[in-house]
Amino acid sequence: MNWDDTTDTSAERLVGASADREDQAVEAALRPKDLGEFIGQEKVREQLDLVLRAARARGATADHVLLSGAPGLGKTTLSMIIAAEMGAPIRITSGPAIQHAGDLAAILSSLQEGEVLFLDEIHRMSRPAEEMLYMAMEDFRVDVIVGKGPGATAIPLELPPFTLVGATTRAGLLPPPLRDRFGFTAHMEFYEPAELERVIHRSANLLDVEIQADGAAEIAGRSRGTPRIANRLLRRVRDYAQVKADGLITQDIAAAALAVYEVDARGLDRLDRGVLEALLKLFGGGPVGLSTLAVAVGEERETVEEVAEPFLVREGLLARTPRGRVATPAAWAHLGLTPPRSATAGNGQQDLFGT
């Protein structure tokens, strides 16, 4: 139900948090239209509601908003809700699409008063455009450079008041001058299973899918705390239920369907388990270097580091140490393997922290 329009290599995986084309097509129909419909992110919703209510009461545009967090948690959805709550149109673009200051100037100069400009992956915007954005956010003005060399002239261009909503998956990459110009900053957290169950029930209703409570719980538990993944798994389980059963999604049907798609009870897929199995079976739980581990799995180093590892670390199944990657006791237990004595010596502290 809550998603973002981003793409990367994880979009090719069933449990990848980035949106593929199918996701984008379905999400348009499933997105909530106001804060009351938005599920989860309670603190962010409460704070944002106050910001928007106050702006409406003053008859002013809302403060600029920065939303950070992992893909699939609802940043794009919240930007659309901000526009809807303010009764304003929304313009959507992304940082990688703005490579020159002129690109940004063209967008800003065409904005209407009160319009919401959603800038996804704002940390990937070019530096010249970023510097132009400082003045636009603070003074609603930009200087357009006409000509080149000594004859170049800066023409000031006044802008109508607007609200910038920036979204980023890497807030630490934003320079402080840009971050400080946002009046409201929010970090999107991963969802609890109970929240994802509500997301799944809502989406099932909109998709006209019959689902039992235990079926929704089974899908939620494998969704990695991400609504986009929950909705994608729901659609795949729906397909299985229509072909293999009578269309009703129960716990057994959901479990059987996700077993076909190789998503296990903790949300690990083939790549995740491949990394853990190589680490445990070939290297005794580590420590092992990232490049060596990637070769053992048959994947690129970047794929292991950027696609598989973040979730494994978050789940407490793998640790990054100065000496290399190390499996935790939970990893051995999840794969049903018995760790060697050296992996459990000293309660694992020696291996985990490389001391």
Image: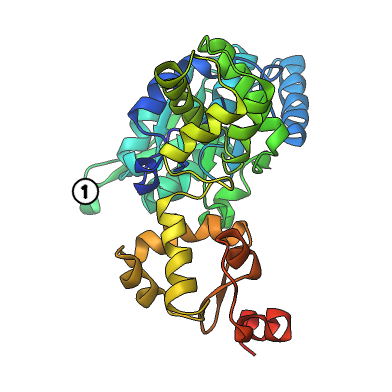
Using residue 95 as the reference point, say whether residue 53 is left or right of it: right
Q: Measuring 65% from the left and 90% from the top, which residue is drawn there?
A: 355
Q: Measuring 50% from the left and 12% from the top, which residue is drawn there?
A: 207
Disc 1 residue crowd, few under 14, some 14–19, many 20+, Cα 10 Å: few
**Residue 4 location (% of width, % of height):** 49, 33
**Residue 242 location (% of width, % of height):** 43, 16
Q: Nearer the viewer, residue 85 or 276?
A: 276
Q: Is residue 111 visible?
A: no
**Residue 47 location (% of width, % of height):** 76, 32
Q: Measuring 69% from the left and 37% from the top, which residue is drawn there?
A: 193
Q: Nearer the viewer, residue 196 or 335?
A: 335
Q: Nearer the viewer, residue 132 or 48?
A: 48
Q: Nearer the viewer, residue 21 or 61?
A: 21
User: What sort of colour scheme is used for the picture?
Assistant: rainbow
Position of 134 relative to 275 (above/below): above
Residue 60 position by quadrant:
top right
What is the three-letter code of the residue carrying label 1? Answer: Lys
Q: Pick the quarter of the image with the N terminus.
A: top right
- Per the image, the residue denoted by label 1 is 148
What element does badge 1 sit on? loop
Position of 351 relative to 247 (above/below): below
**Residue 248 location (% of width, % of height):** 55, 15
Using residue 336 as the reference point, say whether residue 99 is left or right of it: left
Q: Is residue 294 visible?
A: yes
